[in-house]
Image: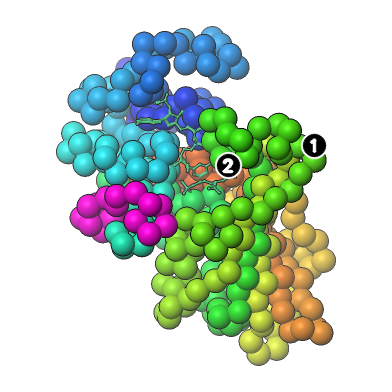
Amino acid sequence: MSTAVKAAIIGSTGYGGVELIRLLASHPKVEVTSVISSSSAGAPIAEGYPHLTEIRTDLLDDVDPALIKSKADVVFIATPAGIATKLTPSLLAAGLKVIDISGDHRLKSRAEYETWYKKEAAEQQYLDQAVYGLCEVYGDAVQGVDLVSNPGCFPTATLLGLIPAVKEGYIDPATIIIDSKSGVSGAGRGASLGTHYSELNENFKAYKINKHQHIPEIEQVLSDVAGQKVVTTFTTHLVPMTRGIMSTMYATVTGDHKVEDFISLYRNYYEGRPFVRIRSNGTWPATKEVFGSNYCDIGFAYDERTGRITIISVIDNLVKGAAGQAIQNLNLMMGWDETEGLKFVPVYP
Ligand SMILES: NC(=O)C1=CN([C@@H]2O[C@H](COP(=O)(O)OP(=O)(O)OC[C@H]3O[C@@H](n4cnc5c(N)ncnc54)[C@H](OP(=O)(O)O)[C@@H]3O)[C@@H](O)[C@H]2O)C=CC1
Ligand SMILES: CC(=O)N[C@@H](CCC(=O)OP(=O)(O)O)C(=O)O
C-alpha cells in the first residue's frame, strides 16, 4: 500500500492546476488522487489537455468536500478569486489541509481585499488562520498548519527581490518603484480580448496601473518587514511570451552600500534556501534562466550618479509564482525537505 500523501486539485483544468499535475507527477511523496472541475465533472482531464494522454486516465471529480476528503489528505485550490473564500470553510471542516493559490486568503484585512478584489472577503477567522506562504521568508510558520495562502506571482518575484534590503535598511522604503512584466499564462487559460494572439503578439502593454490587486499584498509584507507602513508604485506589463515574470525595482540606497554589499546581504539572507540564486556583480537574470523551474534569480546594479539601486528578480509565474511554491509549501507543512519534487533544472533554451 502506498504511503504517499494524497492530494486533490480544485481548478485542475486551469493553468495553475495543470502545472500542479505536471510537477506532482514526479513528486516522490505525493500522489494526486483527485482532479476536480466545476464545469466538466465526469470527463477525462486528458480531453482538454491531450498532453496528459496516458499520464492521467481518470475522470474529473465534482467539487464536493466529502468526496474530496474520501480521496485526499490535502487539497490545492487553483480557482479564480472569490471561489476559495466560499470553499475553504467546508474543506477545513472536512479535515483537509488546504493550500490556496488564489488571492482570497493573502490580505489580512477584509476591507483591503474588498477594495482591491471587488469581491466579498473571507471571514476574518480564515484570514487570521491562513499562513502567508512566501517560503523563504515565512516558511518556518508553515509547518503543521492546515491553511496556507500561496503568494501571488508578482509579489513572489518582487518581495524576494526587496525584503533583505528593506529589512536591513539598505534602501529607503519610501522610494521604491516596482516595474513588473508577465507572460500571458499569468492571466489563466480563459480567452479574453486582451490576451488573444493578435492583441498580444508584437505588443507590450501596461495594465491595471495603480489598481493592481497585488499592490496591497506587496505593501502588507513590506510594511511587516520594515516595521512601518510602506506604500509603493507598482506597474504591471503584459509581454508576448508564455511564461515568466521579471520585476525590476528601483530605490534610493541609504548609507554607502554598493552592489557587493547587496550581494553579500542577499546571499546571507537566503543561505540554505536553494531556490533563491543571487547573481554576481554585472550579471542580471533573464526569465529564460528560470523557465520551468522553482528558482527565483536576483541581480543588482548601482548607479553612482543617482544613488539608486536597481534590483532585477525573475521567476516562472506558474512554478515559483504558483504551483511550485504551493508544493514547496506542502513540503514545509509536512516537515519534508522543501525541495522534494522540485529539483527541476530550468528548460533552456
Ligand atoms: N496563472 C498564473 O500564473 C497564476 C495564477 N494564480 C492564481 O491561481 C488561480 C488559478 O489561476 P489559473 O490557473 O491561471 O486560472 P485558469 O483560469 O487557467 O483556471 C481556473 C480554473 O478554476 C476553475 N473554476 C472556475 N470557477 C470555479 C468554481 N466556481 N468552482 C471550482 N472551480 C472553478 C475552472 O475550471 P472548471 O471550469 O473546470 O472548474 C478553471 O479551469 C487564480 O486565482 C489566479 O489568480 C496565482 C499565481 C500565478
Ligand atoms: C498576466 C496577468 O494578467 N496576470 C494576472 C495575475 C493574476 C494572479 O495571479 O492573481 P492573484 O495572484 O491575485 O490570484 C494579473 O495581473 O492580474
Q: Mark 1 or mark 2: which is in front?
A: 2
Numbered label tally: 2
Judge whether 332 appears above or below 61 on screen: below
Q: CA distance from mark 1 to mark 2?
A: 20 Å
Left or right side of 155 for 242: right
Q: Which picture quadrant has residue 97?
A: top left
Q: Quarter of the image for the C terminus: give it.
A: top right
Q: Residue at x 57, y 30 (%)?
A: 191
Q: Residue at x 52, y 57 (%)?
A: 212
Nearer-the-camera pick, 239 or 47: 239
Q: Quadrant of ligand 1?
A: top left
Q: Under 8 Å from ligand 2: the CB of mark 2?
A: yes
Q: Which residue is mark 2?
A: 186
Residue type, numbered disc 1: Pro
For label 1, the SS is: loop
Residue 179 visible in the picture: yes
Magenta region: 114-137
Residue 346 is situated, as x and y percent measured from the top left of the image, at 69, 40
The mark nearer the N terminus, 1 or 2, is: 2
Residue 146 is situated, as x and y percent measured from the top left of the image, at 27, 46
Q: Residue at x 79, y 68 (%)?
A: 281
Category of crowding for the residue at label 2, using alpha-carbon neighbours closer than 10 angstroms: few (below 14), some (14–19), many (at least 20): many
For label 2, the SS is: helix
Q: Is residue 164 magenta?
A: no
Residue type, numbered disc 2: Gly
> Which disc, if any, is residue 349?
1
